[in-house]
Image (cartoon, rainbow, N blue to C red):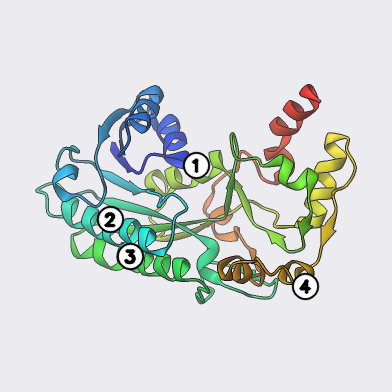
Amino acid sequence: MRVGILGCGYVGLELARQLRGDHDVVGVRRSPDGIDAIEATGATAIRADVTDSDGLASVPDVDALVFAASSGGRGAAAAERVYVEGLRTAIEAFGSRQSPPERLVYTSSTGVYGDHDGAFVDEDTPLDPTTEKTQILVTAERIARELAPEYGIDGGVARFAGLYGPDRYRLERYLEGPVTEGYLNMIHRKDAAGIVRFMIESTDNELLVAVDDEPVDKWTFADWLADECGVDSPPKRTKAERLDDEGLSEAARRRILTSKRCSNDRVRKLGYNFQYPTYREGYRAAIDAYCGTN
C-alpha cells in the first residue's frame, strides 16, 4: 500500500517511520528542512503546499491519504487556510484522479469538545467548540467525513489529545511552575501515529479519539513528575488565580475554563495496543534524561 502524508511533521514523521518497511510512504512538506526530515525516515519526500492543487499534482497516486498539516500555532486565519481550504483542496485534487485514495484520515484535536466540567467525553459526545480555532477544526472534520465520500474516499478523523514525546516533554513547565489546576489529556507521539496507522490498516472506523488510558489532574501530574525527578513540588495556582491575570488573552482564558476527560474506550475495544498507556511510561525517557544531567 502506498500512503501519502500531507504535512509530514511531528506526528507524520513518526508515522512514516512506523510505516516504512511495510508500505511505500510519500511525505509532503513546504520547507527544505521539512524535506530533509522526511528523507531521513526513508520515505519519499515531495515539497508542496496543501493549499496548492498544482503543487499536489506532483504527489503520486496513493491508496491512503493522511492529512496532518499544521497551521504552526498561528491564528484563526492561518488555521482556516490550512485545515479548511487545504483539506478541501487535497480531497478535490486526489479525489478527481483516475485512481483516488481509498482512505483519508484527518488529524483533528480533542479541543472540539469544549467544556464538560471535568466529565468524560468520547466519540459520541456532542461537540461544543469554544474558540474560533476549534470551530474551524469542527468544520474541517465535517469536510473530511462528508466531502471525501463524494469522491469515493472513506473519510476518517483521529482526534488527538495533547501530544508529547521527544522535543515536547516540557518538563521545566511542570517542574518550575506555577501549575494551574485542571485536567491533562495526553498521548505520546508514537501512539498518535500508531492510531493513525491502525485506522489505515486495521479498521474502517470513521472516528477515533486518540488519547491514553489516564487523563490526569495537572497538580497530581506535576507532583508525580517532581518526585520522579527528585525535586521539590512546584508552586500551584487555582483557575481563579490564573484568571485574575490582567494580561491573559481571551483564547487562554477559554482554554482554562475548558475542562474534560477524554476516553479511549473505543480504540481499546477495537484492539489497538498502546506503547505508552499512561504518562508514567511515556515520560520515563525524559525523566531519566533529566536525572542523568542534574
The spot of residue 154 in percent (x, y) is 29, 57
Tally of numbered discs: 4
Task: Assign a secondary structure to mark 2.
Answer: helix
Q: Residues within 10 Å of mark 3 (few under 14, many from 20)?
A: many
Q: CA distance from mark 3 to mark 2?
A: 15 Å
Q: Going 83% across and 57% down the picture, which residue do you hit?
A: 236
Q: Amino acid at mark 4?
A: Ala
In the picture, which quadrant includes the N terminus? top left
Which label lies toward us, 2 or 4?
Answer: 4
- Residue at the front extreme? 246
Residue designated by label 3: 145
- Secondary structure found at label 3: helix
Viewed as shown, does residue 173 lie left or right of 3? Answer: right
Q: Which of the marked residues, 3 or 1, is nearer the chain's N terminus?
A: 3
Image vertical order of residue 65 relative to residue 275, above or below: below
Mark 2 and 4 residues: CB-CB less than 8 Å, in contact? Answer: no
State if disc 3 and disc 4 touch (CB < 8 Å): no
- Residue type, label 2: Gly
- Depth check, mark 3 against mark 2: the one in front is 2
Element type where label 1 sits in the image:
helix
Which is closer to the viewer, label 2 or label 1? Answer: 2
**Nearer to us in this view, 214 or 52:** 52
Q: Kindly identify which residue carries mark 2.
A: 86
Say which amino acid is labelled 3: Arg
Quadrant hosting residue 256: bottom right
Where residue 201 sits, quadrant-wise, is top left
Q: Residue at x 54, y 38 (%)?
A: 190
Q: According to the image, label 1 marks what residue?
A: 194
